[in-house]
Image: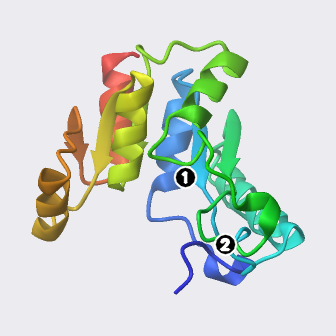
Amino acid sequence: MSESPSDTTDFRLLPRVGEAISKLNRAGIKVILVSNQPDLAKGRISERRFQEIRRHMLRLLGKKGARLDAEYYCFHHPQAVIRKYRVNCDCRKPKPGLLKQAAAEMGISLRNSYMVGDRPADILAGKAAGCRTIWLNDMKCEYCTIMHRMNVHPNLIFRTLNEAATYLVKKGI
């Protein structure tokens, strides 16, 4: 099973994600994407195909009046079939390397930032980088059990990115 979309037809924005990002944009809150993309390392997609999917994502966001301030990707994976990506890196979440790189390049304070994600690796990376964390979850019990077993404790939990964006805008981060 693929961990990432392998074609533009596989990629869809989740409901209201574009609106949520647009809300953050209008409030002057930087939106930075930090993502593990192992399918390149595993030989499941080409660099060209990855860029096509990425551009498709940006077009879909643009149609919703949303934009990303920056994007950071880790293409490494321990089981990479492409040798240059079989690296024990600091950028693959749950390690905080990409968040630290983003902070340095974008001139932001990690302590005053939120890492928003839907997986334990996202929350662990945020905590390791010194961010506050928001876990997106529709409250399915199996995920809560996994998070508890892994000793992963986000600062906040919201069901959707739109709910998290509403909170962040009201808080005025």
Residue linked to disc 1: 18
How many marks can you see? 2
Q: Is residue 169 above or below residue 33?
A: above
Closer to the camera, 14 or 116?
A: 116
Closer to the camera, 87 or 128?
A: 87
102 horizontally vs 158: left or right: right
Quadrant into which the C terminus falls: top left
Q: Secondary structure at mark 2?
A: loop
x and y, in percent, of residue 95 in the image? 48, 40
Closer to the camera, 96 or 140?
A: 96
- Identify the disc placed on residue 27: none
**Circle 1 crowding by C-alpha within 10 Å: few under 14, some 14–19, many from 20:** many
Q: Secondary structure at mark 1?
A: helix
Label 2 vs 1, first from the N-terminus: 1
Applied colour scheme: rainbow
Residue 155, quarter of the rendered image: top left
x and y, in percent, of residue 169 in the image? 39, 25
Marks 2 and 1, Cα distance to the nearest angstrom?
24 Å
Which residue lies most toward the bottom here?
1
171 horizontally vs 54: left or right: left
**Amino acid type, callout 1:** Gly
**Amino acid type, callout 2:** Asp
Residue 12, quarter of the rendered image: bottom right
**Which tag is nearer the camera, tag 2 or tag 1?**
2
- Identify the disc placed on residue 39: 2
Q: Is residue 10 above or below residue 85?
A: below
Q: Is residue 161 above or below residue 111?
A: below
* Residue visible at 39% across and 30% down in the picture: 128
